[in-house]
Amino acid sequence: MSDPSSVGGGETKPSTLSEWLEWKQRHPSDYKTFDLIEITEQRKISKPEINALASKISSARVDPELVRRAAEKVGWKNAATTLVVPMLPTLPNVRKGLFGETLAGMTLVDFFGYQIPVQKLRYSITKNQTLPGTDIIAVKYKDGGLTELCFVEVKLRTGEDTAAAKEAYGEIQRQRVQKIPALLSFITARLQAEQNPLFDLFLRYLLDRHDTTKIESTHICLVWEKMNWSEKTLVNLEDSITTPSASVLTVDLVIIENLVPLVGSVFEELVLGG
């Protein structure tokens, strides 16, 4: 693995996402129940973007401050080999899921100004473990209060699957009742333990959720192999929403060519630092 200035040093190094991807809202759109953001490649991905993705995956699994402190004692390569590599998934589907969630988080932060206060995936115990609940919770805040809290469900597909967006919407709706309250409590506890300045805002929000439709939103992020994308996926989602939620629903559609080799290249960079 490369040194922390290029991989895994983490959250202070700006990504180069906007040099690789660009976004636009589809307008006009045929869909009435959700907004559609299309994110496409401007050019073929290059080494800096692969390094940025590897860095974010590393910091999603292991706190980069822990790696940095270990590196001061045993060197970067030994610290990364000891702390990061053992937590990298080996199962293809888990790798794809981690890649998809990481890329989705980067687009939310880089393109749309969200922050992700807690990296949920850092709390996996084993390398191939997947965690329950909403994939990402992202926030915006201003003047001492939360202005938006966004629940994000991510689906990465390399083949055809026209039911994926509909399934993601169903999962989000079920989780609002069954799992999201517990996840919000978990995030608030982590913010308190880390002495994060967002703790007071989150606690205030958590204690008074009787009418949060004005600040809550939902994103479904679809990361898709270009040759296998079908617009039917969005048609099926639209048809499944018989009673639209009071909160805003947005679909972030990320279309990437040669997605499978890209996932492999990012994990190779993490393991070998080529």
Image (tube, rainbow, N blue to C red):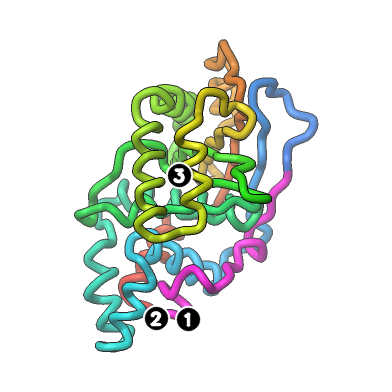
The C terminus - image quarter: bottom left
Picture disc at residue 136? 3
**Vertical placement of residue 208 versus 252, above or below:** above
The outermost residue toward the top is 242
**Most prominent secondary structure in the magenta stretch?**
loop
Which sits earlier in the primary sequence, circle 1 or circle 3? 1
| Magenta-tinted stretch | 1-24
Please give the name of the residue rendered at 25% of the width and 62% of the height, measured from the top-left corner.
Answer: 87
Q: Position of residue 257 (x, y in %)?
A: 55, 52
- In screen coordinates, is 217 left or right of 180? right
Q: Residue at x 30, y 51 (%)?
A: 92
Relative to 258, residue 155 above or below: above
| Picture coordinates of residue 193, whole percent (x, y) | 35, 57
Q: Is 10 left or right of 149, judged from the image as shown?
A: left
Tag 2 residue = 2
For residue 5, the mark is 1
Amino acid of disc 3: Ile
Q: Quadrant of the N terminus?
A: bottom left
**Discs 2, 3 touching: Cβ within 8 Å:** no
Q: Is residue 259 visible?
A: no
Along the horizontal axis of the image, is 176 left or right of 110?
A: left
Q: Position of residue 147 (x, y in %)?
A: 64, 42
Q: Secondary structure at mark 1?
A: loop
Front residue of 228 and 150? 150
The three-letter code of the residue at mark 2 reads Ser
- Which is nearer the N-term, disc 2 or disc 3? 2
Q: Circles 2 and 1: CB distance less than 8 Å?
A: yes
Cα distance in 3D space between marks 2 and 3:
27 Å
Q: Nearer the viewer, residue 130 or 142?
A: 142
- Measure the C-alpha gap from mark 2 to mark 1: 8 Å
